């Protein structure tokens, strides 16, 4: 996790294309892991509160995680409260995951403004 946001400093040259690609891949893996954990939380909530089976819980959690909404009607008050909180969590998570994946791109663009002309030729 320490290397996740470890970028060049202002006085350092731009990272090589290989290093940049590795950063995007590394952040994509972290984003995928975050999505898997969020999906597992949603599935366990649906299985616990609504007594759904594995496949139904997966489908409902995946639909909310993607922003589409649940597939089946909810029957318990606990399930409805869970679904509301989970939907808010997933809505915010989308922005976090997008930021995580795009952080190396934004850093590279902003860092390129600070590179001296002599460093850019190398």
Image (cartoon, rainbow, N blue to C red):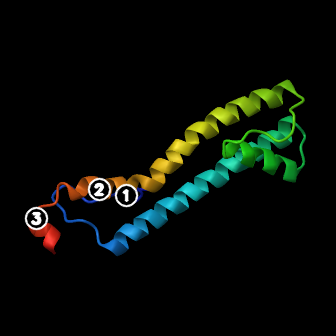
Image quadrant in which the N terminus is located: bottom left
Distance between the Cα atoms at labels 1 and 2?
A: 6 Å
The image position of residue 57, as x and y in percent, is 82, 47
Q: Which residue is mark 3?
A: 117
Would you place residue 85 above or below residue 119 in this image?
above
Task: Write down the quadrant of residue 21 in the picture.
Answer: bottom left
Element type at marker 2?
Answer: helix
Report whether residue 5 is seen.
no
Q: Is label 1 in contact with label 2 (beta carbons under 8 Å)?
A: yes
Farthest residue, direction left: 118
In the rendered structure, which disc, 3 or 2, sits on the residue that comes first in sequence?
2
Would you place residue 16 above or below residue 106 in this image?
below
Q: Which residue is mark 1?
A: 105
Q: Which residue is at 63% across, 32% downward?
A: 88
Distance between the Cα atoms at labels 3 and 1?
A: 20 Å
Image quadrant in which the C terminus is located: bottom left
Element type at marker 1?
Answer: helix
């Amino acid at each position: 996790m320490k290397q996740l946001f470890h970028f060049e400093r202002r006085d350092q040259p731009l990272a090589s294309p290989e290093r940049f690609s590795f950063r995007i891949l590394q952040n994509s893996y972290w984003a995928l892991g975050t999505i898997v954990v969020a999906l597992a939380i949603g599935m366990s909530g649906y299985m616990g509160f609504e007594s759904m089976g594995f496949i139904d819980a997966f489908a409902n959690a995946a639909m909310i995680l993607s922003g589409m909404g649940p597939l089946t009607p909810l029957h318990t008050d606990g399930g409805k409260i869970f679904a509301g909180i989970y939907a808010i969590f997933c809505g915010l998570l989308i922005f976090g995951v997008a930021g995580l994946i795009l952080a190396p791109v934004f850093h590279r663009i902003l860092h390129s403004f600070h590179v001296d002309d002599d460093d850019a030729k190398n």
